Image (cartoon, coloured by chain):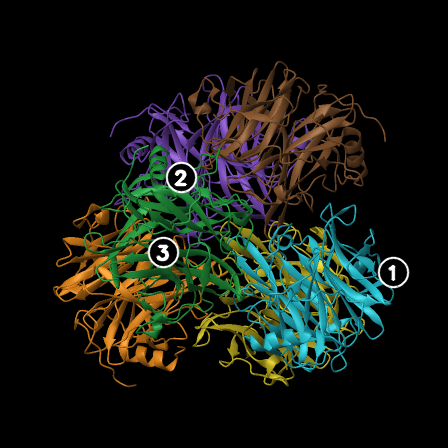
Chain colours: A green, B cyan, C yellow, D orange, E purple, F brown
Amino acid sequence: MTHYTLQGSTLSKIPWEERPTGKNDVVWRYSHNPIIPGDLLPTSNSIFNSAVVPFQGAFAGVFRCDNRRRDMNIHAGRSQDGITWQINPQPIQFQGQDPEVTRLEYRYDPRVCWIDDRFIVTWCNGYHGPTIGIGYTYDFETFTQVENAFLPYNRNGVMFPRKIHGKYAMLSRPSDRGHTPFGDMFYSESPDLEYWGRHRFVMQPKGGWQSTKVGAGPIPLETSQGWLLFYHGVLTSCNGFEYSFGAALLDLDEPWKVLYRTGPYLLGPHEVYERVGDTPNVVFPCAALVDAPTGRIAIYYGGADTVICLAFAYVDEVIDFIKGNSDV
Amino acid sequence: MTHYTLQGSTLSKIPWEERPTGKNDVVWRYSHNPIIPGDLLPTSNSIFNSAVVPFQGAFAGVFRCDNRRRDMNIHAGRSQDGITWQINPQPIQFQGQDPEVTRLEYRYDPRVCWIDDRFIVTWCNGYHGPTIGIGYTYDFETFTQVENAFLPYNRNGVMFPRKIHGKYAMLSRPSDRGHTPFGDMFYSESPDLEYWGRHRFVMQPKGGWQSTKVGAGPIPLETSQGWLLFYHGVLTSCNGFEYSFGAALLDLDEPWKVLYRTGPYLLGPHEVYERVGDTPNVVFPCAALVDAPTGRIAIYYGGADTVICLAFAYVDEVIDFIKGNSDV
Amino acid sequence: MTHYTLQGSTLSKIPWEERPTGKNDVVWRYSHNPIIPGDLLPTSNSIFNSAVVPFQGAFAGVFRCDNRRRDMNIHAGRSQDGITWQINPQPIQFQGQDPEVTRLEYRYDPRVCWIDDRFIVTWCNGYHGPTIGIGYTYDFETFTQVENAFLPYNRNGVMFPRKIHGKYAMLSRPSDRGHTPFGDMFYSESPDLEYWGRHRFVMQPKGGWQSTKVGAGPIPLETSQGWLLFYHGVLTSCNGFEYSFGAALLDLDEPWKVLYRTGPYLLGPHEVYERVGDTPNVVFPCAALVDAPTGRIAIYYGGADTVICLAFAYVDEVIDFIKGNSDV
Amino acid sequence: MTHYTLQGSTLSKIPWEERPTGKNDVVWRYSHNPIIPGDLLPTSNSIFNSAVVPFQGAFAGVFRCDNRRRDMNIHAGRSQDGITWQINPQPIQFQGQDPEVTRLEYRYDPRVCWIDDRFIVTWCNGYHGPTIGIGYTYDFETFTQVENAFLPYNRNGVMFPRKIHGKYAMLSRPSDRGHTPFGDMFYSESPDLEYWGRHRFVMQPKGGWQSTKVGAGPIPLETSQGWLLFYHGVLTSCNGFEYSFGAALLDLDEPWKVLYRTGPYLLGPHEVYERVGDTPNVVFPCAALVDAPTGRIAIYYGGADTVICLAFAYVDEVIDFIKGNSDV
Amino acid sequence: MTHYTLQGSTLSKIPWEERPTGKNDVVWRYSHNPIIPGDLLPTSNSIFNSAVVPFQGAFAGVFRCDNRRRDMNIHAGRSQDGITWQINPQPIQFQGQDPEVTRLEYRYDPRVCWIDDRFIVTWCNGYHGPTIGIGYTYDFETFTQVENAFLPYNRNGVMFPRKIHGKYAMLSRPSDRGHTPFGDMFYSESPDLEYWGRHRFVMQPKGGWQSTKVGAGPIPLETSQGWLLFYHGVLTSCNGFEYSFGAALLDLDEPWKVLYRTGPYLLGPHEVYERVGDTPNVVFPCAALVDAPTGRIAIYYGGADTVICLAFAYVDEVIDFIKGNSDV
Amino acid sequence: MTHYTLQGSTLSKIPWEERPTGKNDVVWRYSHNPIIPGDLLPTSNSIFNSAVVPFQGAFAGVFRCDNRRRDMNIHAGRSQDGITWQINPQPIQFQGQDPEVTRLEYRYDPRVCWIDDRFIVTWCNGYHGPTIGIGYTYDFETFTQVENAFLPYNRNGVMFPRKIHGKYAMLSRPSDRGHTPFGDMFYSESPDLEYWGRHRFVMQPKGGWQSTKVGAGPIPLETSQGWLLFYHGVLTSCNGFEYSFGAALLDLDEPWKVLYRTGPYLLGPHEVYERVGDTPNVVFPCAALVDAPTGRIAIYYGGADTVICLAFAYVDEVIDFIKGNSDV
């Protein structure tokens, strides 16, 4: 195995378990999954598809919490160990200049990206249809919302963790109003987080576990081999959608160019907490914590649209697997 | 908490467990759910969505038993404690004057309502499509079927337990021939149980857990605050329907007027016996036993279209919750 | 050809043309079709599927006029010859006791039936979905609306022109919320026009031109051979619905029993005014004027959901054709 | 009738016919419609949904010409009188810096907008799905394509004819990959025609002729009463889509605010060249020529997705009609 | 233009009109289309998609006649000039050994192929779904039916006019039970017309007018350049299917290999008799008569699933067009 | 109970458990189900719907193994006891003469049938759509593929274990390209395994658990009462397909004639390994081992499209049940 360089916050506290003996899987599950049950909050129906980051020597996060109305909203949370979380029972109240922008329809599937001096939060934001909402925070207490990135209908807006050629960069998956039986990934850039353009096609479904739609997962990880992007793919069986995840390496300079992409998935829904819930058969990654010195990666993913789970991998093994099993 | 007056048979034998410690849920599950497995009868595939009433110091009921042909039919049953049931292996054979009316296509989702001098049974009755069948019994041994209440296509016909302004009154949910991706609740009245009219709209879906369709559940309970109606609501996820239940308070005199209605659900499918079965993710209440002196309510509901379960609540808490979380 | 007795107002003024020479069709078109263009009113988009009756030595009618909002409503009209019509530019304003009943959502596809002392108007009435609205008039100037006959969803409510066994009788076609890719005909009765029951199945689709749905057309004509019912049937081609019409003979005493029913259609959409319009390929009959002494029948039908047309037939020939080409 | 001020190129050569006598329609058809048949080019299947502008004392235009492969593309054309057109048999070959942008998938439904010093052309551009392509020309001979305005999936991108608050402004209708059974209109702005943002909702369907989707038509006309926007609306009948057009007045400063909007349509598909063609029942306006001194407007619209037609109106009458029949 | 050799019966009586002056179309219509109206028979609703052959110095044919039940069946016919036809009012009654085979569900879209000593008739045959029926005749008076070629679901079975490598050969289009929103063409062979195998894929849809499905039309014509196959293609617009036809050249020895295939269609639905009828926008060719010495081809095609039309072409021009506009 | 004669290899090693006490089920599950987990191979996602046969005193099989690309393919395997299996990690590489035939798209749901001197393998084979692939092996090491039996679209091709009237015989279920919401069973025969014909309808869905589609399961077992065919049936609930299995007796000489057929299912999805997996609620039998002296049958079936399970029965009891509960 080659050793690849990984850019990323050193995180000595990362929760970690080694691969179970006798297994060859490149990504393996935490033995105490799920780490966050759907009813962690007294009024929550489910908590899943959420983003966590290292923050002030510990961890912070933005969590999708669907309440018992089945309203979808996002809440801030804090943790000392990345496993046990205190999630704010109140949804994030965004500040902002134009109530047309900050008005709440629904918010879901957040990602959090440290860039320059702040944490950028992106999410699927209801504005006469789903689009990509953008906000930022310095402290996970006060959050400011800025203009939606795109026109509806869009989902899975995921920022790159640094400007590329001087522009902010985002992946997203244009979609439709409903449950979207299709979906490609695109790249867009912005000089100012307000106006977006120079949209480029990145990748589309290509069969098997990723035959219906594909969408970016956690914030891409910068490695010497390209941007390491975990992404989910969907297969439509005769009983509905099934969500798995794999990974790709994108060109560092022109990230819309896919260098390698896993033919097999890295993790598919097999455990009961991934197969049984409000949406059966879903694993959906939204965050990856990395430890550059060791190459450890901790992937947070939603299970069955109901709970939050954790999985582990080594960056070198993941990159070798992508290259060795690529179907670009 | 205020104390509200509840009309209803005193039932000292009602099965009862208190709310689990550390929980705030207004409705909580019986710890030994499911109480009736799907294969209680040698030829049954599933037993669910059924109605029970106090009868002769014990309990009687009408049960939906789908056999291994997957024919849908209703059977009478008896129990001493409301938990352990003897269900007749033979479906109910209705007597009646016109074989065009008593001819069996299918019968499912019964409710039972004591009114005047007898138990009225209503159910979804196949007559060139689903409609509301009506029958009655004095003894749960002999049953007589009268004319269908409405033209097809209809489901969830639920009687009020007394005449209102001198007329029989029924809630129902007009639908279509198939799996009905819509459904509102209506009120109808009849001078004689044979001719029905003066149909009034009651309520429609309104988002979240109740965004696809709503249907009446148990016989409404008369309280000093209005008719207490438990009702199911359906959300369509990307993998199909999900059934939860909430409650409403209807005007005592003009029951088509909704005074209050829960924004959040009271019970959603969370347990494995509610999530896994012939129809995943279903809780479907069809009967509620009450104990007026204590305000205790025992709710019988189907789990995953496969088994019968039990949940508990206090009337005062339910009413306070409806009023405090109303989205009319 | 036998001579059958026809009950019906003698109408010497009936517009009439004999069958074109060289043709054998049992029903033939008026040579100046369409008789009413879609823009007869300054604000109308289309006028079609309407009902006319003899009235005070001339003719009156209730007309479906869709305006340029594409709102659907019904208007009264008068004519001296049944061909040239004055239609009131204002829709009918119904009087009634309960605004919940008279409130306008939409009204379309009216039928008019003389019974006892008045003209009963029935139509597809929007009340949280389409159902059968009922009103009456003595003079085609003042109209009173009474309770909707049925719960939604229903269309094509057609009264019988006399009570049967002392009860009002109506045919209707239970349906759904949308464009209804199905539909059977049912019979219902009422002691008072307010409460309806004793619903009986009458007929269902059975292939060819009547393979998707069937619905009653004009008020049934009483003959010595049974109730003569013209009805439309729908075939779904690869480019949508196609509406033709045929006829049936129903038992005089138990009209839900179909004695005979045409295998072939009597009239299908062939002319350009039947094939081209807001809904291509539609002939839809809503009224039939009869002249008992001669056995002449004049059928008013909508063309392509856009205009009103006229066709002619002799009752004896129609009955012979039904009997000779019956596929009950 | 009030007299409203209209901004717009004086165009003495505008083709013109007065309203037919005996008609009250606010918009009326040219008597020699269609003005451009579908096979004007030897290889064209259909020519429709096209944009014309005054140019050098005569007229120029960009035309949607579907060839007999049924490829969709846009061609430049010239005319002396706006009626008789010479259309270039070759599609427009766009120049541009990035072949990823200029690569042809398909181009259709163009609009042309004079702004500052050039003609901006926008169209529905195939780039892994439909989005809004942008190009410009000075002379209708050489055309340059710049970045797509938005991510897919989008249609009906229509520029405003001047900057608003220093920004380019565009209306568009986000959609999906297919025939889009929905569609709202949004407003977006750009500092440079390359990056777009500050997206605002403008209007949505609201019943009748505009119950399925709405999309901007010609370049909005600036009047003293607001931006006069002709727009198409779609009704879904039981046999498919039907396209009509109406008009709205948008706030001059904040054009996403709808001041007035026609309840009735201004023109619906009634003539055979609007009802019969590759897509039956379509009128689809893409350009409006104005003559400020007289207030005359000539509207170019596609008929049945097959041919190009012309209609006329007076600005004062149109504005009065919008205000007098508004359903905002 | 090169001169290509055409195999085929010399037919001096072929109806013929030259290309209209000023037109360049490779295929042009007969000026008196349609040649057979839908109601040629007293009981026929429509006559279309039919096959004609030279026979005994004149012409014979097998015609699809849908009656006014809308039953689909095939009838024999005769003509002296190929234009004026006498069609037998009775459908063909097939003889055969096994009533399971000859039992009539429905029969439609026949083709007729002279091979060896007889005329083979193939058609879409109802046998628990559509499949390919096979029969033969020597005289167009007596017809014998043999085993269905394939399992359901199949349509457009078209024989080659001679054995290839000693085997009967047939093209067909496997489909489904409904209106089939897909369809590829396959090749199959048989030693005996009873058992079929060695199925090979021939061609699939590829965009534009042939983007939904493709199916063989007339019996392929043998030329020095390959088998000349006219075939229909279908585009799905927002208002349904649209049928055009083009042509391909197949390898003489291995006919599943497509040598050339028209990018543009040869004939699309433009005339009113092709656009308006039971299925709007259909041209559907089922037979081609050839005159080898002159290279003239007369193509019989159905219009709008309602009537029969005629078009003309020269074989050399068609082949040149296919080669010069090929998109294999 | 009568004793029926069963033809079949004596297999003393058959794994066997008696019916659990207190149960009356005719078919009962192995207590250690599932016997093969989905991840038995390091790269497999799921292993299910597979065929096993007695071979050289032990067992061999052909297994459907979907890998983590979710490619579908078939693998050979061996076992000493029929419970513990060694499955070859590499898919079967078929030899054959024409690469057009042996080219791999996908292969799934194999059956294995001993006939004459070899094992015939049939499976659902991707060739421009699903059809029935055929191959054979003598040793489960080398496999040869011959021509596909049928045109697409077909599934569940199941051979009879001897020639009937000198012809090979196969059951199959013609279908479509997608998830096929329909499906009947047909019978076909072949003189040589290459050309197939004389197709006969066998059975169709008829309500309840077998209301959507039916397909043959294991190789039919020859008994003195007819061919004993286990077959799966599908019910479409509001949350998708549910697969159960029953059995039929087919005429020994004319196997397309159904003598008896179970009204109730024999086994439905009840256990968690049948209800939870990639396709919830599936039991799908593909092989049955028999022991003629004892009448024992061991049925191998897929669970939830994820794992392989085992069930047991006695032939006499099964035949009695079919006859006693038949709904032909």
Query: Who is closer to the viewer here, E257 or B77?
Result: B77
Q: Quadrant of residue B97?
A: bottom right
- Does the residue at mark 1 contact the one at mark 2 (Cβ under 8 Å)? no
Chain of the residue displaying label 1: B
Q: Quadrant of residue B34?
A: bottom right
Chain of the residue displaying label 3: A
- Does the residue at mark 3 contact the one at mark 2 (Cβ under 8 Å)? no
- Which residue is farthest top? F117
Residue at x-position 22% and y-position 81%: D5
Label 1, label 2: how many angstroms apart (C-alpha)?
65 Å
Marks 3 and 2 share the same chain: no
Q: Quadrant of the N terminus of chain F?
A: top right
Mark 3 secondary-structure assignment: strand
Residue with the mark numbered 2: E205
Q: Amino acid at mark 3?
A: Val
- Residue A53 circle label: 3
Mark 2, Cα crowd under 10 Å, few <14 / some 14-19 / many 20+, is: some
Label 1, label 3: how many angstroms apart (C-alpha)?
66 Å
Residue C163 percent across, percent down from the top left: 76, 73
Residue A267 showing in the rendered view: no
Q: Quadrant of the C terminus of chain F?
A: top right
Mark 2 secondary-structure assignment: loop
Q: Amino acid at mark 2?
A: Pro
Residue with the mark numbered 1: B141
Q: Quadrant of residue D229?
A: bottom left
Label 3, label 2: how many angstroms apart (C-alpha)?
49 Å
Residue B237 percent across, percent down from the top left: 52, 56
